[in-house]
């Protein structure tokens, strides 16, 4: 395999600031995306396994984006395919306009 070939992962890892956030977050996603939870330094890491559906990552990220907005968090970091990203909550006005 060529070293420039992109390795796709079936796991997404999210960083959450407190254990309370972890409980609520897992309640929201675990029915559809199993995974694990662990504490590392002062951050909680929650992993979610994708189900193989081509739209699964997009569905998971939309669900997480809604959680971030509803929970009052400004943004959370997540990791997929060896890269880190920041998922910001949509402004409530944008959410209402889309509905």
Image (cartoon, grey):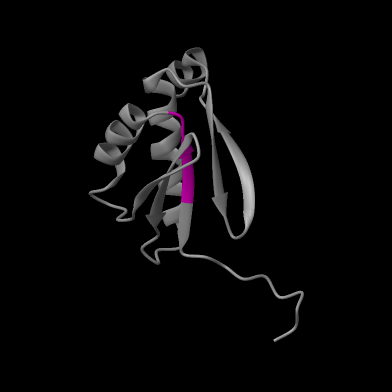
The residue drawn where x is 63% and y is 47% is 84
Q: Residue furthest top?
A: 93
Q: In terms of image quadrants, where is residue 81?
A: bottom right
The residue drawn where x is 76% and y is 74% is 4
Q: Quadrant of the N terminus?
A: bottom right
Is 4 on the left-hand or right-hand side of 89?
Answer: right
The residue drawn where x is 30% and y is 44% is 29
Is 77 on the left-hand or right-hand side of 16?
Answer: right
- Residue 41 x, y percent position in the rendering: 50, 39
Residue 64 or residue 13, whichever sits in front: 13
In the rendered image of this protein, does residue 55 appear above or below residue 88? Answer: below
Write down the region rendered in magenta: 13-17
Is 78 on the left-hand or right-hand side of 16?
Answer: right
- Residue 78 x, y percent position in the rendering: 54, 44
Q: Quadrant of the C terminus?
A: top left
In the rendered image of this protein, does residue 39 appear above or below residue 82? Answer: above
The residue drawn where x is 39% and y is 28% is 18
- Residue 50 x, y percent position in the rendering: 40, 60
Q: Residue furthest front?
A: 41
Residue 89 or residue 22, whichever sits in front: 22
Q: Is 38 covered by the magenta stretch?
A: no
Question: Overall secondary structure of the magenta stretch?
Answer: strand
Q: Residue furthest bottom?
A: 1
Q: Is 15 covered by the magenta stretch?
A: yes
Q: In terms of image quadrants, where is residue 51?
A: bottom left
- Residue 65 x, y percent position in the rendering: 45, 33
In the rendered image of this protein, does residue 59 appear above or below residue 7? Answer: above
């Amino acid at each position: 395999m060529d070293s420039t070939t992109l390795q796709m992962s079936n796991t997404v890892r999210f960083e959450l600031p407190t254990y309370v956030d972890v409980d609520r977050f897992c309640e929201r996603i675990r029915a559809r995306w199993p995974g694990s939870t662990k504490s590392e330094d002062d951050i909680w890491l929650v992993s979610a396994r994708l189900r193989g559906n081509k739209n699964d990552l997009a569905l998971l990220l939309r669900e997480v984006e809604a959680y971030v907005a509803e929970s009052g968090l400004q943004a959370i970091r997540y990791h997929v395919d060896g890269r880190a990203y920041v998922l910001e909550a949509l402004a409530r006005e944008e959410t209402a306009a889309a509905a």
